[in-house]
Image (cartoon, rainbow, N blue to C red):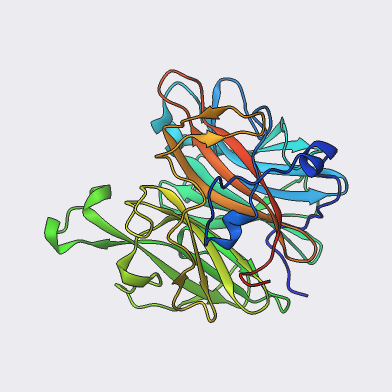
Amino acid sequence: MMVRLVAITVLGMGLQSITAFESYSTEPTDNPLKAKMGLPLKEGGFVREGFHLWDPSIVKVGDIYHLFASCWPDDDFQKWKQSYAVRATSKNLLGPYTYVEDVLLPRPGNFFDSQGVHNPKVIFHEGKYYLYHLGIPRWQSGVAVADSIEGPWERRDESCIPLNNPAMWIHDDGSVYGVGKVKIPNPKYDGSKEFNHQFHYLQAVKGNSIFGPYTHLHGKKENALPENFENEDPCIWFDGERYHVLVTDLHGYATGLRRGFTYYTSEGGLKYELVSKDPLFSMMHPIRFADGSEFKFARIERPNVVLNEKGEVIAVLAACLPPKNQGGSRILVFPVNKYYRSGD
């Protein structure tokens, strides 16, 4: 069986999360993943007083779930460029998670991550943990390796993944496929590099190792998504036949709802198909919780998934920023009732 993004089982999620499962969707949906998604715990997920949290990734080791995330002080959200990676733990997949330690800090000197460590994602493969991340100020991605989830983490001096905010998958044979966001100049704005003056396309790479070297699978201005749909924050998993990605629909071109979590699949990893125009959720609508309450976040981004031993999705993760002056951003964990692929 293929190596999964995370190595966890559905056992041990906690009685509350199993017996109180309620569908997140209040209306019929043609999105097969959304149809199996449940409500998060209001007091679950990961909250750290005085800090912003972003970019969640979870792996299970023994009976404990380990959540990695970007972290920085909550006095200014824009300080994310000075973020670092932290680890938190819980006995319940849905949380709450408790902060344990700082994992990767910016390294002073001439390193690609000398100012910030962002978007950490963990993979377990062949007895080792790989924690790949975006480095600031070079906006390049590297990999740290450890024999234990508690470290120590061996960091290389140079970056090795040629993608911005990558999402990577390691296959059984050790080969790697990954996707990431690329910024393409928009002729309408005459070469402007402002965020909204560029196209944000998805492109893919492949390599024989997580450390590369990598081959780009798309031309400089190609988009792996259909109809020039834009993306940010991809995550990825593979079911043995197709690649699956969740992305943030930046401008709502794919779903009609800005920054909704949007689901695509691809058989060969070159061209992706939109599974549904119905997003999992969007920053335009309040989030529903298991206790019946609702809360409208200012931003909902950074999708990720948790898989069990069979490769089934058992949770969707999201980073959520409340309105101004209402605390730091937090991580939510949405239970999923063992989703494998559409039609199963």
At 56% from the left edge and 43% from the top edge, which residue is drawn? 318
Specify the farthest residue to the front: 28
Tell me the quadrant of the picture where the C terminus can be found.
Answer: bottom right
| Above or below 205: residue 119 | above
> Where residue 32 sits in the image (x, y, percent)?
59, 62
> Where residue 283 sits in the image (x, y, percent)?
42, 40
> Where residue 320 sits in the image (x, y, percent)?
51, 36
Tell me the quadrant of the picture where the N terminus can be found.
Answer: bottom right
Relative depth, front residue between 192 and 153? 192
Please give left or right for residue 123 compared with residue 223 in the image: right
| Above or below 54: residue 99 | above
Residue 235 shows in the view = yes
Please give left or right for residue 205 compared with residue 22 in the image: left
At 64% from the left edge and 44% from the top edge, which residue is drawn? 334
Looking at the rendering, which quadrant does residue 8 occupy? bottom right
At 79% from the left edge and 50% from the top edge, which residue is drawn? 60
> Where residue 18 sits in the image (x, y, percent)?
80, 44
Relative depth, front residue between 297 and 55? 297
At 60% from the left edge and 46% from the top edge, which residue is drawn? 317
